[in-house]
C-alpha cells in the first residue's frame, strides 16, 4: 500500500491545521461519510434491532438453546439488512447453567442476603455450606493474608467499584471476581462471596466470569449486591463472627457448538481487505442482554447496513462479526483469530462495540506511530458527531483485543460508560436502559469509521503489538 | 379546654401578621421547640436507629419470627432512649409466607420474567399455571371487559404509576393490585399478574397487599417488574397470543400474635391527654424495611427521645406508637383504635410517619375549621426547617387514618416522596436509600410538632370526620 497523492495532500494540510480541528476536510469520501452520519442520526433501525433481539430472543448464555435461537435470529436479521454475504462459523463453547443461588446470615442476625453465582462456579453440596465469613478490602489483601485467617471460612472481598466515564473502576476491582476463588481456595477457604463489581446501589448482584486453576480446589463463588455487602460490613462491625449459609446449584454441562455470525458488504476494489466491526451476540442470563451487548450488535449491524445501501460500495470489504461466547472468556474472538489467521494480514483495522449504548466521545487507535496523525485527520469529520480525536493506545474491544498480536491495527470508539456498571451483568440489563438517541449517535460513529477506513489509503502497519 | 390568654394574644398577633410568615413567634414554648429543631438537625441518632433495625433484625413480615424479634428490638431500643414508659399491646395478625414465585413466557418468545407474589396471594398448583395473557390498561378496563375476553386467561394489568412529589400516582394505580384479583376472578381468569405499582425501571417487582372476596374464586396474584411489563407489551404487539407460565408457592399460615410497641414521655400537667406520633414496625420481606418503615420508626422514636431529655416535660403525654402489621391492612392501627376507644377523647392529635425519609416540606392538619389558623400559627417556627403551612385536609397517615372517625384531630407532615415508589415494597428498600440529613430534618419536624402540640392551648375539636 502506498499513500495516494490525495492523502499526502490532506496530511500536509492537516500538519498545517493541527490545533485548529474545526476546519472540515473536503473530499468525496468525507462527503459520503457525513451523509452516513446524518442518515444514522435520523434512523431508529438500531433501536428496533436491539428491541427485536431482547424481545424475541432475550437472554442467551453461550451454548444454551436461546444462544442458538440468537444465532438464527442474527442470520435472519442480517439477511434482511442488505448485506452481500451472511454466514456463520462454529465456535466450541463450554456450557454452564446457573441453577439456584441463595444465601442467608445464620448468626448473629439471621436474615437473607441477595447473591448470584459467578459464571463457571461449581455448586455447593446440596445441604449448603455454612461457615464464618472473613472480610478483605480487596484481592491483594486476601493474597497477603495468613492461611489461618482464611482456612475453613467463606471469603468476603468487599471492594467498591468507583464510577468513571471510562469505566476504569471495573479494571480496578474485577480481579477479585476472576481470581478471588483461586486465591481463597489456596488458603483453605470453603467458598467466596464478593461485593458485586458494579457502581449501583440496587439490591441485585452482578454476575460475570470467574476462573479456577488446575490443582487448586474448586470452591463455590458468588457475588452479593452492594446493599448486602454494606449489610455484612455493618454486622461485622458489631460482631466479627458472622456465619453465612450458601446454597448454589450451578452445573457445568460440557461443551456445545455456538457460532460467530458474520455479514459482509463486499469491497468494490480491495475485496480481500477487511474492515472489521464487531460486537458479541451472547449475553448473561439474568437480564435480556440489551446493553451487553445487544446495543453493540445493533450498532455494528446498522452501520454495516447503511454502508450496504450506498450507491457506490467502498473499496475494502466491511465485515460485521457478531461473536459467540464473549462473556465466558472471549471464546468467539479467540476462535475467529485462530481460524482466520491466514487472512489477518489483510485485516486493515478492527473495532468492537461492547460497552453499552452511551455516547461515543473519543476515538483511539493502535496504528503505526507515523500513521496516527493521518488517521486522526481522516476521521476528523466524526467530531461533528461528538467524537474527539484520542490517543494511539487502543485495545479495540474484548473480541478484537488479540488482533494487534497478529499485527492487525485496531480502534476503540470510546463510549460514556458512567452508568454502564450500574446495570452490567444484572437483571437490570434491559431495553429501557438504552437511550435511542445515544444509540443512533453510536451508529453514526461506526458507520463513518467503517466507511472511512474502507476507503483509506493510509498504511496503518506495523502496530505496537505490546498494547 | 379553653384558650389561654397567651394563645389569644398570639392568635391576635397572628391575625395582624398573616401574609408575613417570616416573623418569628416568640414565647418560651417556641424557644424550646427551636432548640429541639437544632438538636435534631445535629443528631445522627435516627440514622443509627434505622441502621440498627435493618442490620440486627432486617425484614419483618407480620407474625414471622423476625417480626417478634423486631418487637423485642423495639422494646429494648425504646427503653434505652429515656422514655418514662415502654409497653406492648397484642395484635392478632394473619401470617403469610412468600415461598417461591417464578414466571416465564412459554410462547411465542420463551424467556423468564421477574415476578413477585402479592401479599396474601394463594399458590398456583405445584405444576404451575400456563395460560394466554390478556392485557388491560387499568383496573377499570378489566372491570368493563367481557367475560369471554378474560375466561381461562392470565390477566395482565399494565398500568404505569406516574411520579409525583406527593406520591399521588400510587393512589391512581394501586387499585389494580388490591382489587385486581377479585375483578379478574369474577370474569373467570385463572391468575393475575400486574405491572408493579412503582415508578422505577429496575428489574425487580413490587409486592404489596391484595384482597380476596368471599364467594369469589381465589386466584394467584403477582406483580412483574416494569422492564418485564414493557417486554410483555412488546411481545403482544408482535403476537397477541402470549402464553405465560406461573409457579407460586406462598402459604397462609393462620393467625399469630404480634404487638404494637408503645413508649411515652409522661405529661407534666395533662398526663392523660395524648399527642400520638406513630410509625409501623412491620415490613415487607424482600428488602430490609429501611424506608418502609424503619425510617418512620427512627423518626418518631428520636423525636420522642429528644422530648424526653428536656429539663421540663411538656404538659401532655407524648406517645410513640410503633404499629404492628400495617402492611397487611393497618391491623395494628385498627387494633389500637379499638382497644383505646375509651381513651380517644383524650387524644389531642395524632400523626404517623410512613412515607420514607424524604424531607418534610409541608404540614397539613385535620382540626376544627376555627382552630386551623391558630395551629398554623403555632407551628410557624417549623418553616425554618423547610416545613411550610399546608391545608386542613390531612389523613394523618395509614395507622391513624381511622382516628378522625373517632373525633381525633390528625396532622400529616408531608414528605418529598419523589423516589419513594422507586424502592417501596422491593428488595431495594435498604439502608443506603436513606439520606441521613433528610432523616434528621424529619426528626426535627416531628420533635417540634409533638412538643408544640403537647404544650398547645388551642382546642382542636370537632374535626371533620368525613376526611
Image (cartoon, coloured by chain):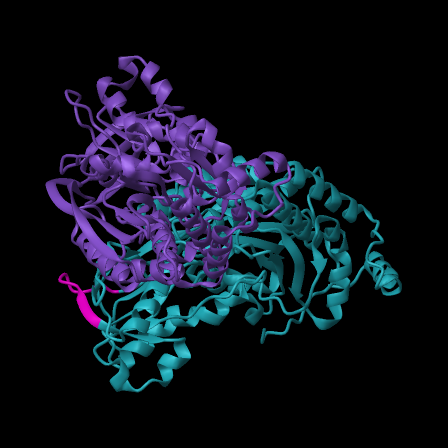
Chain colours: A purple, B cyan
Q: Quadrant of the C terminus of chain A?
A: top left
Residue toward you, B144 or B158: B158
Q: Is residue A155 visible?
A: yes
Q: Residue B93, how many percent across, how many down?
A: 35, 58
Residue in the picture at 76% in, 55% down? B380
- Is A240 situated above or below B177? above
Residue span colored magenta: B122-131
> On the picture, is B201 further left or further right than B29?
left
Residue in the picture at 41% in, 75% down? B138
- Is A115 situated above or below B240? above
- Say whether residue B126 is magenta: yes
Q: Residue A184, how many percent across, how many down?
A: 26, 22
Q: Residue A245, how many percent across, how many down?
A: 25, 35
> On the picture, is A134 further left or further right than B140?
left
Main secondary structure type of the part rendered in magenta: loop
Q: Determine which quarter of the picture holds residue A50.
A: bottom left
Q: Quadrant of the N terminus of chain A?
A: top left
Residue toward you, A322 or A429: A322
Q: Is residue B226 visible?
A: no
Amino acid at each position: 500500500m502506498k499513500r495516494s497523492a490525495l492523502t499526502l495532500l490532506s496530511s500536509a494540510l492537516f500538519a498545517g491545521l493541527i490545533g485548529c480541528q474545526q476546519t472540515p476536510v473536503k473530499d468525496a469520501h468525507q462527503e459520503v461519510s457525513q451523509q452516513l452520519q446524518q442518515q444514522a442520526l435520523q434512523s431508529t433501525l438500531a433501536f428496533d434491532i436491539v428491541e427485536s433481539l431482547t424481545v424475541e430472543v432475550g437472554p442467551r448464555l453461550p451454548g444454551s438453546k436461546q444462544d442458538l435461537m440468537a444465532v438464527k435470529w442474527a442470520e435472519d436479521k442480517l439477511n434482511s439488512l442488505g448485506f452481500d454475504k451472511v454466514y456463520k462459523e462454529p465456535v466450541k463453547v463450554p456450557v454452564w447453567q446457573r441453577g439456584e443461588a441463595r444465601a442467608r446470615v445464620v448468626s448473629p442476625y439471621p436474615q437473607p442476603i441477595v447473591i448470584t453465582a459467578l459464571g463457571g462456579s461449581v455448586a455447593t453440596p446440596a445441604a449448603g455450606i455454612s461457615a464464618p465469613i472473613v472480610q478483605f478490602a480487596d484481592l491483594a489483601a486476601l493474597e497477603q493474608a495468613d492461611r489461618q485467617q482464611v482456612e475453613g471460612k467463606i471469603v468476603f472481598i468487599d471492594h467498591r467499584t468507583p464510577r468513571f466515564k471510562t469505566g476504569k473502576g471495573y479494571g480496578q476491582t474485577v480481579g477479585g471476581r476472576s481470581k478471588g476463588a483461586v486465591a481463597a481456595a489456596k488458603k483453605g477457604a470453603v467458598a467466596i462471596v464478593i461485593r458485586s463489581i458494579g457502581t449501583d446501589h440496587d439490591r441485585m448482584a452482578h454476575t460475570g466470569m470467574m476462573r479456577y486453576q488446575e490443582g487448586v480446589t474448586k470452591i463455590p463463588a458468588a457475588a452479593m449486591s452492594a446493599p448486602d455487602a454494606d449489610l455484612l460490613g455493618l454486622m461485622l462491625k458489631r460482631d466479627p463472627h458472622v456465619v453465612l449459609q450458601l446454597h448454589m446449584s450451578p452445573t457445568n454441562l460440557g461443551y456445545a457448538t455456538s457460532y460467530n455470525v458474520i455479514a459482509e458488504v463486499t469491497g468494490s476494489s480491495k475485496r480481500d481487505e477487511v474492515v472489521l466491526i464487531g460486537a458479541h451476540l451472547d449475553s448473561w442470563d439474568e437480564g435480556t442482554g440489551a446493553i451487553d451487548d445487544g446495543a453493540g450488535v445493533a450498532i455494528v449491524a446498522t452501520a454495516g447496513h447503511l454502508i450496504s445501501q450506498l450507491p457506490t460500495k467502498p473499496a475494502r470489504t466491511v465485515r460485521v462479526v457478531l461473536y459467540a461466547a464473549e462473556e465466558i472468556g472471549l471464546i468467539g474472538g479467540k476462535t475467529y483469530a485462530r481460524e482466520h489467521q491466514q487472512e489477518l494480514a489483510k485485516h486493515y483495522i478492527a473495532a468492537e462495540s461492547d460497552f453499552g449504548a452511551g455516547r461515543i466521545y473519543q476515538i483511539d487507535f493502535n496504528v503505526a506511530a507515523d500513521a496516527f496523525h493521518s488517521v486522526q485527520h481522516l476521521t476528523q469529520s466524526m467530531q461533528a458527531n461528538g467524537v474527539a480525536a484520542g490517543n494511539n493506545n487502543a485495545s479495540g474491544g474484548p473480541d478484537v483485543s488479540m488482533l494487534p498480536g497478529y499485527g492487525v491495527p485496531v480502534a476503540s470508539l470510546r463510549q460514556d460508560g458512567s452508568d454502564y456498571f450500574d446495570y452490567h451483568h444484572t437483571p437490570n440489563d434491559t431495553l429501557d436502559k438504552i437511550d435511542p438517541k445515544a444509540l443512533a449517535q453510536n451508529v453514526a460513529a461506526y458507520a463513518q469509521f467503517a466507511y472511512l477506513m474502507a476507503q483509506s489509503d493510509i498504511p496503518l502497519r506495523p502496530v505496537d503489538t505490546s498494547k
